[in-house]
Amino acid sequence: MAYKITSLFKQQEGFRTHGHSGLDFQMSDGTPLKAVEDGQILIQDYGSTNAGLTVKIKFNGGDDQIIYGHLSDTTVHTGDIVHKGDLIGYSGHSGHVYSSSGGNGAHLHLGLKHGNEFQDPSPYIDDIQNMNNPNFVQHVTEKTPEIQDKIDISSESSSIFEQVGELFNTIQLIDYSSFVEIIQQSFQFLFIHTSFLYDIIACII
């Protein structure tokens, strides 16, 4: 379903005192709204003024914000971390709205802010139009090949350590007394025969 864009960035209709700070999408009350960026949530409620119940997603280290205005409800809280495709709330007509069609003025105000300056959010039009498409990006935690390699290496290392530990335990069980006795007897044998050879050489000389 395509949402009609009823007001463009910087557009100044007769009911505005200055150029529009974002884009307006005609949208029925209760339409699920999805995050179009990974980031941290900031919720602000302007009551019956401005954009009403507003959800902002801070991203790029907090320097940029995606702004969703006029919501009827939210599913997130300030400080939450969201990912592209996560549900953040539902569209509505909170705040100050204007309807040229005589309805309740339900729509989504989408804004983009860099620092203190409003930017044109048009690059996100396609995301908003497709946010409720089943094929829209869903955040699924998967092992990347690099992480998987580390996991495999870790598993192999663990197995090696276990084998070394078993070998060490086996060595500890060996009775070394017999080896020590054999070595002592060998040295005694060499000492006796060396002394005998020394006596023979001394007689010859």
Image: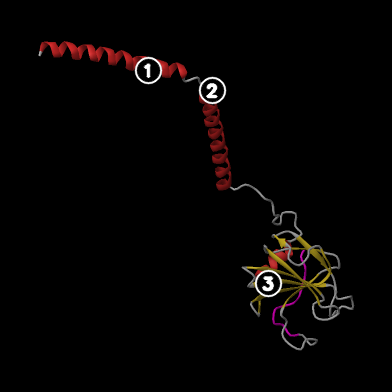
Q: Kindly indicate the quadrant of the structure image that contains residue 203.
A: top left
Q: Is residue 204 above or below residue 147?
A: above
Q: In percent of the image, x 55 and y 47: which residue is there?
A: 146
Q: Quadrant of the N terminus?
A: bottom right
Q: In percent of the image, x 85 and y 65: which residue is there?
A: 30
Which one is in front, 87 or 148?
148
Residue carrying label 3: 65
Q: Nearer the viewer, mark 1 or mark 2?
A: 1
Q: Kindly indicate the quadrant of the structure image that contains residue 44.
A: bottom right
The mark that comes first in sequence, 2 or 3, is 3
Which kind of residue does numbered mark 1 sit on?
Gln
Q: Which mark is residue 184?
A: 1
The mark that comes first in sequence, 1 or 2, is 2
Which kind of residue does numbered mark 3 sit on?
Gln
Judged from the image, the secondary structure of the residue bearing numbered disc 2 is helix
Say if mark 1 contacts mark 3, CB within 8 Å.
no
Where's residue 162, x and y in %? 56, 32
Where's residue 6, x and y in %? 77, 76
Q: In percent of the image, x 37 and y 17: which residue is there?
A: 184
Q: Nearer the viewer, mark 2 or mark 3?
A: 2
Which kind of residue does numbered mark 2 sit on?
Leu
The answer to whether residue 1 is left or right of residue 188 is right
Label 1 packing within 10 angstroms: few (<14), some (14-19), many (20+):
few
Say if mark 2 contacts mark 3, CB within 8 Å.
no
- Whether residue 155 is in magenta: the answer is no
Find the magenta span and give its range.
Answer: 1-12
Which one is in front, 68 or 61?
61
Residue carrying label 2: 173
Q: Nearer the viewer, mark 1 or mark 3?
A: 1
The colour scheme applied to this rendered structure is secondary structure
